[in-house]
Amino acid sequence: MKISIIGATGYSGLELIRLLESHSKVEIFSLHSYSNYSENVAYLYPHLKGICELPLEPIDVSRICQHSQVVFFAAPSGIAKDQVAPFLEAGLTVIDLSGDLRLKNPDDYPTWYHFPAAEKGLLDQAIYGLSEWADVKKQKLISNPGCYATATLLALAPLIIEDLIELDSIVVDAKSGLSGAGKSMQTTSMYTEVNDNLTIYKMNQHQHIPEIIQQLKKWQSGVENIQFSTSLIPITRGISTTIYAKLKSRLTTEELNAFYTSHYNDKPFVRIQAPNKLPTIKQVVGSNFCDIGMTVNPTTNQVIIVSTIDNLVKGAAGQAVQNLNQSFGFAPNDGLKFSPIFP
Ligand SMILES: NC(=O)C1=CN([C@@H]2O[C@H](COP(=O)(O)OP(=O)(O)OC[C@H]3O[C@@H](n4cnc5c(N)ncnc54)[C@H](OP(=O)(O)O)[C@@H]3O)[C@@H](O)[C@H]2O)C=CC1
Ligand SMILES: CC(=O)N[C@@H](CCC(=O)OP(=O)(O)O)C(=O)O
């Protein structure tokens, strides 16, 4: 099956190339940049030499539609919403990695993304592809979740579905490496600003907050809000979320762990750690795993859940490939057999 990638020169687009080059059912037909058409991708990114040396092309909708069955959008938020329609009309499957199609309520876009929403019909059609909890089989328009949202939702799902916590007590403290901000130049991403530092940003204003609440409400309609903070830490890849919540009734760490194991034992990309063993970022980097660990503090009756992912894999390109596999009925791990890189 032939596919095209729009935004192929960004961090998530490059990760799509890496994963899809090892996919048994996929051939990359074309790679699209916004500003650089003169080189092949391996000239610009020499790590791809001998692996993928396709030219970078401007977006030519009719050529893509003629040859490809699937188009991945890995462009900044605000682009896909105005560009996906002709691909859908031509019968292609679209998998969008941006935030453009994640929220169902159009009014949320000016507030959280600072641009107008996509056309309502597109928002209605888009399936939110949190792979472990979504059914994207044969779906034509898949909206890939945000990286922080993925780590947070996978960690919260059993607590919410089993109704184990006070719904107004959820506090999420998430930290991300720098590749989460993409490749574009910003003062806040400079070595001098990030090295030896931890910077809390977008407090109470992060664009993944409404996306997380929207999904939590599907599991328990009583969820109104969460306390959510994001920090930048001086690593290249990875997200770690620490989640605190008040248990409704007494539960041991072992009992809680059993809930998590039962929810995820048929979901191979989520690895539940042994009770009281909290995952590190390094144990998932380079892979599509989301590792989840937990502990209960009996003195406060608080539960503490920690989840870690590679933001570019499970948080972006890897989950997009998981959704492709689900949508087309391919083996769930095709293109995703990479072990974490350790140490
Ligand atoms: N980085 C991450 O960890 C995650 C990112 N995402 C989402 O994935 C998407 C890509 O992110 P990321 O890889 O970090 O971004 P980058 O900034 O690294 O790359 C952006 C890519 O989009 C292209 N591009 C820029 N402007 C346009 C435009 N107007 N039209 C078409 N293409 C354009 C760029 O092309 P060129 O520079 O060649 O002109 C480049 O290939 C974003 O929507 C982001 O929110 C989602 C989850 C995690
Ligand atoms: C470290 C860092 O800056 N991370 C980005 C995550 C970008 C992303 O994946 O968000 P969307 O897909 O919703 O645009 C941020 O916090 O905005």
Image (cartoon, rainbow, N blue to C red):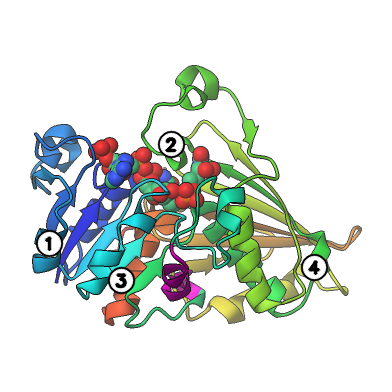
| Residue type (three-letter) at the residue carrying disc 2 | Thr
Pick whichever of labels 1 and 2 is earlier in the sequence. 1
Q: Is residue 80 among what the camera can see?
A: yes
Q: Residue furthest right?
A: 299
State the CA–CA distance, disc 2 to disc 3: 26 Å
Q: Element type at marker 4?
A: helix
Between marks 1 and 3 in the image, the one whose residue lies nearer the viewer: 1
Discs 1, 3 touching: Cβ within 8 Å: no
In the depicted structure, whether residue 197 falls above or below residue 83: above
Q: Specify the segment rendered in magenta.
A: 119-132
User: Around disc 3, counting alpha carbons within 10 Å, would you say few (fewer than 14), some (14 to 19), or many (20 or more)?
Assistant: many
Pick whichever of labels 4 and 3 is earlier in the sequence. 4
Pick whichever of labels 2 and 4 is earlier in the sequence. 4
State the CA–CA distance, disc 1 to disc 4: 48 Å
Between marks 2 and 4 in the image, the one whose residue lies nearer the viewer: 4
Per the image, the residue denoted by label 2 is 236
Pick whichever of labels 1 and 3 is earlier in the sequence. 1
Determine whether, in the image, residue 189 is placed left or right of residue 56.
right
Discs 2, 3 touching: Cβ within 8 Å: no
User: Around disc 1, counting alpha carbons within 10 Å, would you say few (fewer than 14), some (14 to 19), or many (20 or more)?
Assistant: few
Per the image, the residue denoted by label 1 is 62
The quadrant in which the N terminus is found is bottom left
Per the image, the residue denoted by label 4 is 167
| Residue type (three-letter) at the residue carrying disc 1 | Ser
Q: Which mark is residue 324?
A: 3
